[in-house]
Structures are given as structure tokens and as C-alpha cells.
Image (spheres, coloured by chain):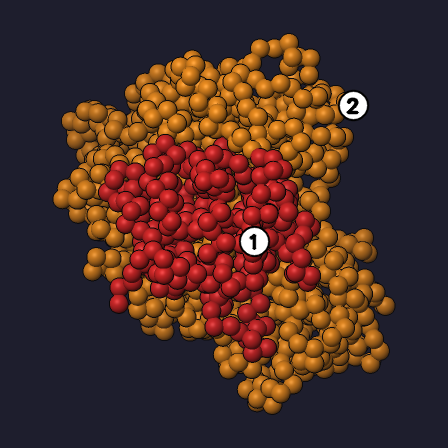
Amino acid sequence: MPSDVRALIITGFGLNCEAETSHGFRMAGAAPEQVHLNDLLDGQRALDEFHILAFIGGFSFGDHIASGRVLANRLKHRMEEPIQRFIADGKLVIGICNGFQTMAKLGILPGLDGDYRRQTVTLMDNDCGTFRDAWVHLAANAESPCVFTRGIDRLYVPVRHGEGKFATLDAPVLQRLESEGMVVFRYVDADTGEPTDAFPHNPNGSVRAIAGICDPTGRVFGMMPHPEAHLFVHNHPQWVRQRIAGTLPAEGEGVAIFRNAVGFARGELL
Amino acid sequence: MVHRIEIGPKLGVNDARGNGVVANVRTFLHMDVSACRTRSVYKVHADLTADEAERVREELADPVIQDSALGRLDAPNFDWLITIGFRPGVTDNVGRTARTAIEDILGRKLADADAVFTEAQYFLVAPSLAREQAEHIGTDLLANKLIETIRVQAADEWRAAEADLSVPLMLGEPSREVRTVDLQVSDDELLRISSDGILALSLEEMQAVRGYFADPARVEDRQALGLGPSPSDVELELLAQTWSEHCKHKIFNAEIDYTDATTGEHTVIHSLFNTFIRRSTEELREKCPWLLSVFHDNAGVIAFTDDWSVAYKVETHNSPSALDPYGGAMTGIVGVNRDPFGTGRSGQLQINVWGYCLGSPFFDGKLPEGLLHPRRIRDGVHKGVIDGGNQSGIPYARGWEIFDERYLGKPLVYCGTVSKMPRLVCGEPSEKKYVKPGDLVVMAGGRIGKDGIHGATFSSEELRSESPAQAVQIGDPITQKKLTDFLLEARDKGLFAAITDNGAGGLSSSIGEMCTYSGGAVLDLAKAPLKYDGLDPWEILVSEAQERMSIAVSHEHIDEFLALAERREVEAIVLGTFNDSGKFHIKYGERTVGCVDLDFMHDGHPTYRLKAVWEPRSHPEPELPAEPDLNRALADLLADLNLCSVEKKSRCYDHEVKGLSVVKPFVGVNNDTPSDASVFLLDYGRPEGIVLTEGILPHYSDVDTYHMVASCIDLAVRRAVGTGASLDHMAGLDNFCWPDPVQSDKTPDGHYKLAQLVRANQALYDYTTAFAVPLISGKDSMKNDSTRGGVKISIPPTLLFSLIAKMDDVGKAVTMDAKCAGDLVYVLGVTADELGATDYARYVAQQSGRPEAIGNHVPQVDAERALAVFRAVSAAVSGGLVHSVHAPGRGGLAVGLAKVAFGGELGITADLAKVPATSVCCLRDDQLLFSESNSRFVITVAPGQREAFEALVGAVPFACIGTVTEAPRLVIAGQDGSTVLDADVMELKAGWKATLDAI
């Protein structure tokens, strides 16, 4: 049966997580489609065709100037209205890593007071000063309206970034994110399960250990770690141990994010 | 006009880049800098209105964390400002992206001549720093003078100065000069022409070139084209590139007169490549029906499943990395990406590997004039491959580092890439490319500049002070990513049937090779897109400017191809036409500037005739201490540069992108112990895996390169089999890096070095055939010597044996770390008195003040016995009978057991009396612990599987030597029953990590 939920994965200009992000949506029962950014900009394809928009990981424009900056500018100048309409229609937007960086710089996160055009948060150089690839433990905020993380308590996924330190324009923005449940994921200590500032559990020095946030509706969501890199049980760094212990799960932990998105879209957007 | 935009972190915002500079200045240059603030400068060379400039400033900066200004930002308190910019003509990737961004912001195209130039600024707080020290920081840490400019200003100088608006414009006049090179000259003069022109052609080759052009039978035809009886510079350069050691492998194809002085045997070898490498693969062809395309294309191709084949290539990029570690190494990785990409009908890039042979980063001796400090080389090489690989979205599977002072002169920078191809592209086998006469010559990707001119010929010589700066290229991974994305789209639409990359030799090599498929080509250099004016036609032909592919496109498809390129913002230009004239005909506009027969180009070079004499060199035996402190020896070896953890740098490389990694470069309960082999899924939702590993043991070359190569192959196969690879679906890649093996005044020991090469090849044949691991691709780099400041440094003969294998079901993979307390610890395979040239022998030799006493009993391989052990282990792994498998290598059983233990953060108790050993003599405890005998495994097995496991491996020598314990201690009983080693596993691990974690 052809799927009813259509997910758009924008590609091109150094983005590079299109295959695994598409597969995540496919595993969750959606029909993903990879469309080159220029095909959207020149009108060959349109956002309106889709229910879910994914800004994927990668190095858009090489992270030159700053991560996500050049892509955000291009979207702002050449695609702003379709994106604003997509959000206003209550459709789902997810940004992962470079996608999150792009959404922050475009201003569609956190979307305080319905303003999806102004930049108030950013992702900056990791405190450790380098790109880092390492698996991290995340705790999800049960109070968050985020539709992508329903039923998720903990998540074990890799970070792969040089600019992942979350920062806000000022203290009031941070305060509102926290009090309004818009902080979705935090980096936690593997042993205690508590949010931490300590490297390497908190891989980049993010304020309040923030790894992902959403808008007040919970439908626009961005995170630095990569759920699409943990679609298969064999992606888990400890899967051989799990096999020996007989605790190998049925699917990779990251799939839940995609299932939530597709399930929500099927219920609310069709 | 120039608009200057300065962007820096707001006060109070952490400056991670600046903090990194402070740390490096302190630990590397040992100077006191208390703080460093960084800024980025964009000099926009374009006519913008004041309002436009203001908008650009606003939109380039991050309002959350950055301040920005047109002109200059206020200065914080500082003592010195160091500003780093690019020299004219050097690739400025950020500047190019900024240009694109500005067009988006302004909603209009900039003029062709408009450009953005970037600079980095470092404001140092360092009151006690003298100007020379600030300059030292600029020269020896922040910038490379070959490609960058450095400006040091004291605070008051900066305040007194105006905002700097200078830009490094490349000002060249359009040029079309073609010179004729008169070769009717003396032999000395011929050699001078070759040397001055960095042609790297020998006298015989220069004479062959002279003879070809002056041949009376040819003169008339040449006259008709406007060419004379001597070559044009275009022709001479074309031949120099095509005939370079880099491209034609003249030493591997030489006729070698080989004498084995130990036996007196005398043989003549007609081509090492044909005799040992190609012959091995040909003999294995029937056994290995999955061999699809070997040796002739840019990468070797093997079938993997019914739907997919896999291509693999490993390259070295040594000379450029010596001059500019960052740019050279980045070009190494993005360059090798283009090989499996440009193989057959083009493959999608899946996995990278890297490995470096370097001088010690802690080197504190006197460096020969002109060499970069090995720590700079290491930092730069890592950063280049990190940026190149990460930005291309390709995960790495394997990474390693080897250190030896003999790599101070030329570092070895190995980079490799695996691609996968659908078995069929538009209904045709993807590994086969074809070019029809009439197809168009198309070049796509980056533009041509002076960068990388003479890379192929320059890497075919030793490194000398006159080595050209322009031989260095800087990669641009994003331009390449756009290019490869576009070409895969075009491939799947069936828009081309042949593709190759522009690497060494640039167009001369890519079109020169591709036109052999059709039988000729006409190329118009005037059509080539240039980065700037001022290139002569020969420079356009041989420039190795990066990110370019050459494609053969038919008339039927050309419009669609070019239209798609434009939509993907990729520059693609028709440069000529393939034909079957038998000639490579090169024009500049209407004028013919060169025309050479393909036969002569590809087969006209004289065969080398070389001599090799094998006289083994004897080393004093190490004096093993009467009562060795084995605890200390193990701790010291684990902390040794060559055995310690390289995780810190490795974590900067992405190994998870694409979401297909299964056994990662680091495994163990804390994800921090190197895996024996890495496994990646071939495709989403499929069980098959690609297994990658390698063997590299250059220190064994000090005794015998034959056993060095045998050991590399054995180690690689062991690592793969132990992880779960199929023994029946394994292929190898050979990458030789050698010191110059041609006898000459500069190389008085050439006969010996060539004999080392012969013996290495003999082993390559013997063991690849014995293990049925066919070679599918390889490369040689034969001039890894450096003569600077009167000091010659030559590398030890080094072979990297890279292995690629299939596993049918990744779910059966096993990692090397101990899993459960109570498991039994087995050793399979025999330990012999084989300490020669091992790490323990070197350690003892150093300790006793006789570093030359490395011994002679180098580890050897008994292929038949090895194969029996491999088969037993393979059966045990696929039968699910084992919890961990490790192939001990450097440091022997002692280091192997320690790694298995600290991988699982568990302990091991073992009894040396039980270790299977050669019966001929009684080995000492330290020999059992540190001998690096091949074909051995350390395996842990659950007690419940004991019988099944022992029944399965029963035919090969094995023993249960101990158990895994909950308490993390490594406790080893000697042969007399007393405890000879008792160490805290976590302490061993901490020491193993500390060495390179510090920098």
C-alpha cells in the first residue's frame, strides 16, 4: 500500500544524511522523498505536497561562515513564505544537527509568541574546540509538547558536530524555553541519568545540557544528536554485549522519533 | 571597492578557537599567552551600496553570540594581533561560500571579477611576549607561509592604523604562450631541462622524447599542424606527466636483475607488478568469481551481492602533506574519494580509511632546515582529513598512526575510500565504461588554477628545497559534494557511460587515459574555465586543481547533462571530442599546440633496467634482562607512541554518518578500545556487511621485508576473520611507500633497497595466493626521501595491506573486548622465539643503551598452519561460540591480553605455562608475553560453550590459558607458577590513553 504520509527531505549543497533520514521515515511507514533544494526554489516541487519537512544533517555550504548560516539565509530570502505557511498549517518540521542549526538561525525555532522569523537561539563552537563523534545519553522531557518524543524517556544516539553548544540570546529566552516545556532533550550522565555540564557526557558545553528544543506547539523540533544513526539494533555500540545478554531490542532507538512523527501526521494531518 | 566586515564573539561568549590557540601555544611552543580572542574578516571585493554592505554585515553575523562591524570592531585589551590571510591564488573556500551568501542576501548576482577574501585574526593577551615570539606563533602554529600571509601588529600599531582593505587579488594577463623546447642538445642539457622543469624524466626518457619528435617520418605531418621537430612545452609536459613514476610505475615495471647473495641465486624479473601482483590475482580468478574489475580502473571492483558491487582504493599523498599538511592531506582524502567515484560508471562514496606514518610529535631534536615539526604535520594532516571526510559526509572505518624518526622527512599519509555501485546502471554492467568516437569531452566541477601544477612529477622526486609551492592544492569538499551528487543523478538518468577523475597530471592524464577507450581525442584548452587569467596552455593541461571529473557524454545526452549541471550549480564545460585518430590532439582555440600518438604516450617510455642484491643485514640481539620487570615493561609499551590510544584525534572524524556502522573503530564497554576490524552495513534493511581492516608493520623491514609483508597480510586476515568476515570473499590492496630504490650517487644502497622491494613482492605473491586473498588495486610511492640542509632522511620500506571482505550477516560479528567475568581465555596458534624488530626488543634495546640491538628473529608466517587457524576461528565465530576475538599484533600476547581486558574493563588471570609454544626450545616468560608471532588469536568463550568450542578448533594448536575476572586486574603466572605480572587494568588503560590524549 503506498503510504499516505509524505515526508520531504531537502538535499544538496553539502547536506549528507538524506539516505538514513529517508530510511527512518520509511521504517515508520511514511513515503519519504529526497528533493534538491533548487527544485523547491525554482518551483518544480512545492512544500505543500508534504506533511513533514526534514532539515537533515550534513555540512550545508561547508559550515562556512557558521554552521547553517548560509542555508538559513538562502531559505529566508527565497523560500520564507512557503515555510511559514507550512508551520502555520500545523505541519511537522524536524531538524537534525545541521538542520537544527539551520532552523535556529532561520528563526523558526523556538518560535516564541508565534514569531518564527527572529533568531533568538544558536548553536556555537563546542567548548572542546573540535568536531566530536561520540554516543551520548539523552533524557526526554515528559512535560514537553513535542510530538516527536512522545513515550520516549531516554535515547542513546551519536553526536557528530563541531558547533553544537546551545546558547540563547538572553536569560529570559532560556527561562521561557525551560518553563514552557520547550526543552525536549538534555544530555545526561550515563550513570546518574541527570543532566550534566561535564564533558564528555555533555559533549559541547550546551547551557543547561540542552540537546534539543521545540516550538510551543511541539510540531517544530530540532536536536543536535542523530536519531537517524540509530535505526538498527546493530548500530548500538554495545549490541554484541546485548546479544550475549539476550537483551537485543527489536529495532534501533532512533526509530521512535520517526514513528511519532508519522503517527501524528496520520492522525492529525491527513 | 572593498567592503570589510569583521565578526567576533560578543564579550563574555566563550571563544573555543581562541582557547585552542592558547593551549597549543603553551604546550607546543612553550610560550606564555594568557588569552586569545579570534575574529573573522570578510573583505568583499565588489561594488555594494552602503545599504547593501550593511545588510550583508547583519546577515553574516550571529545576533545571539557575535558582534560585527563594517570596517573594524573595537579592540579588546590585547598585546599582539596576528592576522592570517591567503596568498594570491590560493583556494579560499569560505570566501567563495561568502560570495554565494552575499548573492542570496542581495538577491542579485555579483560580477565575475567580484570576490570575497577571508582572514582570521588572533588578538593575544601576552604582555611578556616579544615581537619575534608573536611572529613565531604566526609562522609555526597559525599559518603556513607557503600559502598564507602573516601580519603581526602590536596594540598601538593596530590602533594607529586604518582598517586594512588590501586583498590578495591574482592579477594575471590572459596568456597563450606556447614555447618550443629544443631537444637537439647535449645530454647534460637534456637533464638540465628535465630537472629545471620538474619533469622528473631520466636521460633515456628525454632521449626517447627527442627521438620521437625528430623522427623524419613524423616531421611532415607535424608541419601541417604547425608543429616543429621539437616538442612544444604542452607536449613535453604531457609526456612528463604521463611517464611520471606516479602514473606509469616505472620501477614496478622495470626489468630487475636480482641476486640473492645468501643462495647465490640470480634471476631476472620482468616487471614486479606482472610477476607478483597481477599473477597472484590472475591465478585466483577462478577461485574468486566475484572479481569484477581489477587494476585497470581507478579502483578495484568486486561483486558483493546480486544488487551491489563495491570498489576500493587507497592512495598516499605524502609530498604535498610534507609541504602543507592541512591542504595536502585534505587533498589526499577528497582526491582518493574521486577514484572509486570515478570507477566504472561511477560509485557512491560509502566509507573512508586513513593512516599516517609520522615523526614523533614530541620530537625535540634539531630538525633539518625547511622541514615542519612533526607535531604540526600531525595536527595539520588530521585536520585536513577530518574536514575533507566529514564535509563529504563519508564515515571513516579505520584510522591508525605509526611513529618513527625516519618519517620526519616525508610523512606518509594514507587515505582510502570504498564506494558501492549498483551491479547494473541503465541495464549495463556498472564496472565497465566505454567511450565512443564522437562523444564529447566534458569537464565538470572546480575551475583550473595554478594550484597543483607538477604534483605528479614532483611526487616522483625526493623532496628538495626547490620543491614548488604550487604543487600544493587545497581541497574544497563542498564543491566536490555538489559535483558527486549531480553526477550520481546524471548516472542514474543514463547521461554518460564513462567518467574518470582529474587527479595527478590533471587533464593530461584524465583525457589521456580516457581517450584510449575511443582511440583518440581533440581537446581545446581555451575552453577550460579558469580561476583567474595568466595560465599558459601547458599549465591548463597539467594543473591538478581539485574537484574536477572528466566525463564522456554523447551528443544525444549533452543538452540534458548540461542543463542538469546548471540546475545543481555545478560548472560543466565541453572541452572537445573523443575520436579514433590514434592521437591526443591538443588545441588552444584554433591553434594546434600539441599532437602525440597514443601508442607513444602510453607505451613509448623506455623500460628501466635495475639491479637488486639481497644481502641480509644482521643486528645485535637484544640482551634480555635476567629478571625483567614485566609490570613496568607492559605499562611502558602500552604508553609507547606506537601502541598507545589514538582516540582523541579519531573522535574528530565522523564514523556514524549514513547510519550503517556496526562494528565501529572503537569498541568495548566504554567505546574506547580499537576494534580489530570495522564492519559497515552494505545497505539499509539488508544483513550483509563490509569488513575493513589492515596490516602495517614497517619496523619489521629492518630485518626482512619478506616477513614484513607476510606479517601484514597475516595480521589483516586474522583481524577480519576474528570479527566475522568470510574467508572466501576477501580482497587486498597493496600500497607501497619506499625509499628511492634506484642505485645512484644519492642512493648508494639502492641495490639493497630494491632487493627489499623484490622480497616484499615475493611475499605478496606467496601469501595472497596461499590465503586466496586477491589483490584488486594498489599504488606505489617510490621516492620517500628528503634531502634538506644536507641531511638525507629515508623512510623505512613500508607496505600498507588493506583488506576488504564480506560478511553475509552482520548480526554474527564479534568484537575484541572481554565480555563476561567467568569466561575462559584461549590462545590459538603457536608462539615462537620471534622478538626480532618487535616493540619489546626495541624497548629492551633502548633501555640497555644499545638501540641497534633489535635482533633478527623477525616474526614469520607458515601459510598452511595459519590458514588452519583462520578456518577454525572462522567456524567458531560463525557458529556463535565465542564472546570475543582479538588478533594480537604489536606488543604480542601481553599487550593483546591487556587490551582485551581493558576493552571490557574486566580482569584476566592467565598461566604462561599453558601457552602453545614451539617445542624446539624453551621460551622465557618475556618471550612468551612479547613475541609477536603471527597467526595467533586471543579468544574468550563462555564456560558453557567450552566443549563445543574445543571440539571445533581441536585440530589446531590451542589452549585455555585462563579466565576473565570481575576484578579488573591482569594477573599472569610464569612458567614456574609464580606471578610474573600483576597490574591494575584501569591503570594500564589510563597510561595507554595519556600519551596522545595530552596533545
Residue labelled with disc 2: B128
The one nearer the camera, B195 or A121, is A121
**Mark 1 falls within which chain?**
A
Q: Are marks 2 and 1 on the same chain?
A: no
Task: Inspect the image, locate mark 2, and give the three-letter code of the amino acid beneath it.
Answer: Ser
Task: Inspect the image, locate mark 1, and give the three-letter code of the amino acid beneath it.
Answer: Phe
Which quadrant is home to the C terminus of chain B? top right
Image height check: is B522 above or below A10?
A: above
Which quadrant is home to the N terminus of chain B? top left
Q: Which label number is shown at residue B703?
A: none
- Density class for disc 1 (Cα within 10 Å; few <14, some 14-19, many ≥20) is many
Q: Secondary structure at mark 1?
A: strand
Q: Residue at x 71, y 42 (%)?
A: B363
Q: Is residue B133 visible?
A: yes
Instruction: Identify the chain drawn in red.
Output: A
The one nearer the camera, B359 or B674, is B674
Residue labelled with disc 1: A185
Q: Residue at x 64, y 33 (%)?
A: B13
The one nearer the camera, B521 or B343, is B343
Residue B288 lies, in percent from the top left, at: 36, 71
Residue B304 lies, in percent from the top left, at: 36, 66
Q: Is residue B617 visible?
A: no
